[in-house]
Amino acid sequence: MTQPPVDLVVRGGTVVNADWSGPATVLVRQGRVAGLLDADADLPGSAREVDATGRLVIPGGVDPHTHIGQTLGEFTMRDDYERATVAALWGGTTTVVDFAIPKPGQAPADAAAERRQLATDARCDAALHACVVAWDDTAEDQLRSLAADGIRTVKLFTTYRDQVMANADTILRVLETLRSLGGLAYVHAEANHVIEHCQAEQAARGRAAASSHAQTRPSLAEAAAVEDVLSTAEYVGAPVYFVHQTTPSAVDLVRRARGRGVPAYSETGPHYLALDARSYAAPHPERFVCCPPLRDPEEVAALRLRARVGQVDTIGSDHCCFDTAQKSVHADDVRAMPNGLPGVETRLPVAFTELVVNADVSPMRFVALTSANPAKLNGVYPRKGVIAPGADADMVVLDPAEERVVRVEDMHMATDYTPYEGRRLRGWPSVVIVGGRVVLEDRVFTDPGAVGVPLAAQEMPTTLLC
Ligand code: URP
Ligand code: ZN
Ligand code: ZN
């Protein structure tokens, strides 16, 4: 039987998946990868060809942790799905997983329905995490119907009292329910009682400003909450994923639990690998305020080591698009500040530079951290996170030697600053392909249009990642 012609050929490059890498030509038909050929095989006729000679061809990035246009407390982030996903594409990320955080008193299912509608404007695939703040009689049914609709990951916060903090009972019930639904809890783990006490003590000494942020949220608070949630997960036999881990001790707790057979996973963020608490002693410390905070250089070095040796599973941007005006309103009191850093566009270059360029991590491991593992832990693998027949044709061609200096005026996020201003980074995409369409080439962006329906998650893998 003769095959229909292919729509796109990506030839001459080195294909890098998490589990295989080598020279190959990628064929694309109707938005999907149709096959991989030997680099010297005869090519079928194709409407379009991308020459990737001398460059890497990786699966599009999967960002497991974004906050797009969200309202957190008094402040609303400056972006929306269109703006954030265009920026994601410029940075080589072709799938984002965003949070449906309920407004005060809102049901998780209603928050998710609202987000689903907003996400139809995305320019690349967007999946969603739900969020449970307080368990009630309706919660189990809500989680069940969310799972049936393709939302199987649920965020839990152990901090931010009176906003989104969940108590221990809620955490247990969510973990227990997700176990039966093939889902996964995404936990922001910081011990709130320690943080509130510490913030009050520091404020009494006149140290509530952004410059004291790291002292107000000690590393111990992160470890304490991770330990606590891990015990609950182990007790109910549920998997658990810790978002934005910032300390070696927190990562080690997850790793030790893995050693006991607990399916526990560790995410860190580019900013926790590339920046440190010295930013709080520099001008405009408020622009670096995120929770957990940036840590001391020694802790950052120890965290980076763990990421290098494979003890971290994913890298999520924790993208929060506040601008400098919003960040500065309460710069004198971190208890009232908008937390979080813009980063969906810089996630891949910062991670590539810190890990592949500066630390000799293999491009395959880089793909595992930034694409394959996030896809697996969001139930969208192997549709996403791999270049293989049947997968969505989301790909990035990048020249590992090309270096660019970060300038906010060259960025596409809806803000007026980047925490990486002036940094020399590698790992920028030269070509980005989404669903078989070339959307970025030679720094020219072609809007693919709104993607429509959000991406649905399948059941999570029950095996541990390697
Ligand atoms: O500082 C952060 N990370 N803000 C966003 C909300 C969260 O905690 O993930
Ligand atoms: Zn968080
Ligand atoms: Zn977050």
Image: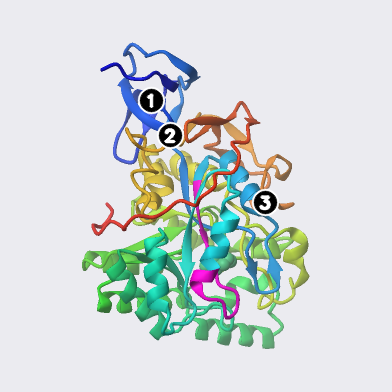
Q: Label 2 belongs to which residue?
A: 393
Report whether 13 appears left or right of 258. right
Depth check, front residue: 269 or 175: 175
Q: Is residue 163 above or below residue 396?
A: below
Residue 106 inside the magenta-drawn segment: yes
Nearest to viewer (mark 2 / mark 3): 2
Amino acid type of disc 3? Thr
Q: Is residue 452 above or below residue 311?
A: above
Amino acid type of disc 1? Val
x then y, percent, for residue 276: 57, 60
Indicate which disc, 2 or 3, sits on the residue closer to the N terminus: 2
Q: Residue furthest front?
A: 1
CB within 8 Å, label 1 to label 2: yes
x then y, percent, for residue 59: 42, 38
Q: Label 1 belongs to which residue?
A: 26
Label 1 CB-ligand 3 distance < 8 A = no
Region rendered in magenta:
95-110
**Dot 1: within a 10 Å radius of its alpha carbon, few (fewer than 14), some, or many (20 or more) residues?**
many
Report whether 47 appears left or right of 179. right
**Label 2 to label 3, Cα distance in Å?**
30 Å
Element carrying mark 1 = strand
Q: Residue at x 68, y 79 (%)?
A: 208
